[in-house]
Image (cartoon, helix red, strand yellow):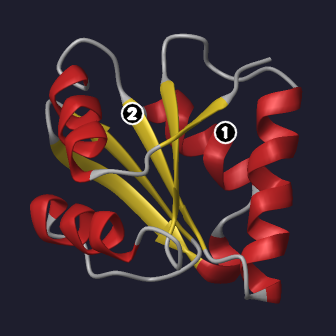
Amino acid sequence: MSDMMRIQTIQELQTALADSSRQPLLLFKHSTRCSISAKAYEAVEAYLQEEPREDVTYGLIQVIQSRDVSNEAADRLEVRHESPQAILVKDGVAVWHTSHSKLTKSALGEALNSH
């Protein structure tokens, strides 16, 4: 099982993005005030409980508590902000993303296994 690392500062985000040149990064942008985001969070947790790729770093940005970090991720990755949202990053570039009800355990598995 893998854990999600909370990304709470722009510096932590910059470090995680830089590290994606060595190991892919899956960012999960989560709103603690949204029922759709709660379901997506459950999907991410279910993926991490089963057989996640161990060679991927999993990062969590709580968009309400860390709005500046969420906005910085959208700007740096050139992916329009949505919540909930998953973004797969390699070499500092977004190579896949999805959001809302499309963010499922199976979608994560397919994306992570094909990139």
Tally the marks: 2
Residue nearest the observer in this picture, 93 or 9: 9
- Amino acid type at circle 1 is Gly
Q: Is residue 2 above or below residue 96?
A: above
Where is mark 2, residue-wise?
25
Residue 52 in percent (x, y) is at: 70, 23
Residue 75 appears left or right of 1: left
Distance from the alpha carbon under mark 2 to that under mark 1: 14 Å
Q: Is residue 78 above or below residue 34?
A: above
Q: Residue at x 14, y 69 (%)?
A: 78
Residue nearest the observer in this picture, 26 or 10: 10
Q: In front: mark 2 or mark 1?
A: 2
Q: Is residue 113 above or below residue 28?
A: above
Q: Residues within 10 Å of mark 1 (few under 14, many from 20)?
A: some
Nearest to N terminus: mark 2 or mark 1? 2
Quadrant, the C terminus: top left
Residue nearest the observer in this picture, 40 or 65: 65
Residue 82 in percent (x, y) is at: 44, 83
Q: Residues within 10 Å of mark 2 (few under 14, many from 20)?
A: many
Q: Residue at x 65, y 54 (%)?
A: 107
Where is mark 1, residue-wise?
109
Residue 14 appears left or right of 84: left
Local secondary structure at mark 2: strand
Q: Which mark is residue 66?
A: none
Local secondary structure at mark 1: helix
Q: Is residue 115 above or below residue 81?
A: above
Q: Residue at x 81, y 44 (%)?
A: 45
Quadrant, the N terminus: top right
